[in-house]
Amino acid sequence: MDFEIDGATAEKLEEARDWGEREMRPAGLEADREGRPLPVDHAYFKKFLARGDGRTRWRGPGEDATHESAASDAGNRTVSALLLSEEYAYWDRGVTVAGPGPGLPEPSVLSLGTEEQKERFLGPFLEPDRPRWACFAMTEPSAGSDAAAIKTLARKDGDEYVLNGAKCFIGGASRADWILVQATLDPEKGRAAQRAFFVEQGTPGLGGFKIEKKMGLKAYESTSFTLEDCRVPVENLLGGEERYERKAGFKTAMRTFNAGRPVIAANAVGMGRAALDEALRFAYDHGLLSRDRIRDRLEAMSRKLRMARLVCLRAGWLADLERPNIVEASMSKALAAGVAQEVTSLGVELLGTVGAKGDHLIEKLYRDVKAMDIVEGTGQIQRMIIAREIVQLPR
Ligand SMILES: Cc1cc2nc3c(=O)[nH]c(=O)nc-3n(C[C@H](O)[C@H](O)[C@H](O)COP(=O)(O)OP(=O)(O)OC[C@H]3O[C@@H](n4cnc5c(N)ncnc54)[C@H](O)[C@@H]3O)c2cc1C
């Protein structure tokens, strides 16, 4: 593995640092203090678009540039994206996720969507006229880790599908132009019967949006909603009916998750780094650096973060080589989320009463970081995946 950061990535990291300090950190603190997501018309989102962000990676009709082919063009695309993900989360992870764009479902649409679907659903993200969001809805009140147990039902009726069910904790659902909803044709048939559907905002039957209360990451909304006799045309089935293969529906969701695990790991490393810097600054300002027990804590924080970053970058390096990375992707997330929780906790301890007061960045980081262990497969689930791969159990 080459650890040198190429010139283009270094430049982007410099820009990210400047943007993060100027815009992201203040927006994150504002949302946290006000205890609500950044509103849709927040100035941050307009600046975000003006900066050229919030766009799709799809290159437009007729261009055969899927995520995969674009990835193979640039040798270190994933590693570079991970370093940027770490930097943005350093400044504010909630604001990173809050940003407009095709978000979590984009990789699935790029790799499995029909040309017509890419044009319809990603087209508006080519040169967005306003901040636009899209989101991916898998989790249900009774199905989180066991994603194969979802109950949202899709019934075929002529040239439509009728969706019924409830989703929860879905990032950006009430503001999304469309939601990629994971549903099942038959809950008894588990994974094989799952499909993903584009449900556009305003479709009759889609409603009941309720923004959940969260302990951290308040800058973006996590929202529950219901689907009641919600009808979508067959053209809204991801990949189209003719391209459907057995188990492809569930694989859609897993594809989304596999792409995301090292990103969550990188986010966690970034948040841990922010906590380390706060702790270092505090120790310096208060003349604590000569104390062994303070230095011991700072050393542990630094060492563990570096270890987590290395595993994360290895997962990205394998992806760039188009080599299987399932174990490394899960390891990176399991390790980095745990390390970041430990590091933010040590940081709060090191600051003593100042850290525990509730108005210090380190306390916010401590609350924000817990979700890194939960989203896109909890720590326990990652460890199960790793163990299964090691002993070669069927997936
Ligand atoms: C901030 C935030 C944002 C989110 N955003 C989204 C989103 O955009 N889209 C979306 O679809 N979902 C989203 N989620 C939901 C998230 O994916 C789920 O919370 C997660 O999958 C865990 O599911 P659960 O909460 O139902 O917990 P459960 O699955 O009920 O698990 C509870 C506990 O049991 C453990 N556990 C479960 N099964 C096993 C097992 N077999 N062996 C050992 N331990 C086990 C888990 O690790 C966990 O500790 C979000 C959640 C949060 C907190």
Image (cartoon, grey):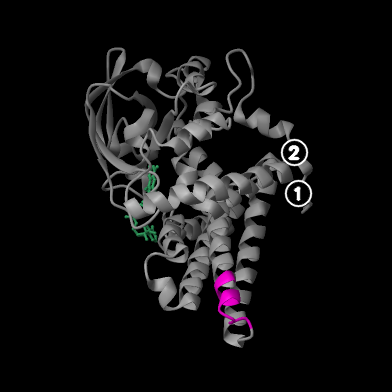
Image location of residue 196, percent across then percent down: 39, 30
* Separation of marks 1 and 2 at Cα, in angstroms: 12 Å
Disc 2 residue crowd, few under 14, some 14–19, many 20+, Cα 10 Å: some
Nearer the observer, 45 or 286: 286
Residue 26 belongs to magenta span:
no
Q: Earlier in the sequence, mark 1 or mark 2?
A: 1
User: Which residue is rendered at x = 59% and y = 52% of the image?
Assistant: 86
Q: Which mark is residue 5?
A: 1
Amino acid, disc 1: Ile
Picture quadrant where residue 140 is located: top left
Nearer the observer, 74 or 53: 53
Left or right side of 33 for 120: right
Q: Secondary structure at mark 1?
A: loop
Left or right side of 49 for 67: right
Nearer the observer, 66 or 20: 20
Q: Can you see residue 391?
A: no
Residue labelled 1 has its Cβ within 8 Å of some atom of ligand 1 = no
Look at discs 1 and 2 and give the one toward the viewer. Answer: 1
Depicted 362 relative to depicted 209: above or below: below
User: Which residue is rendered at x = 50% and y = 51% of the image?
Assistant: 25
Image location of residue 238, percent across then percent down: 44, 24
The magenta region covers 281-289
Q: Secondary structure at mark 2?
A: loop
Image location of residue 380, percent across then percent down: 44, 61
Count of numbered marks: 2
Residue 283 belongs to magenta span:
yes
Q: Can you see residue 290?
A: yes
- The residue that label 2 is drawn on is 75
Image location of residue 383, percent across then percent down: 50, 60
Residue labelled 2 has its Cβ within 8 Å of some atom of ligand 1 = no
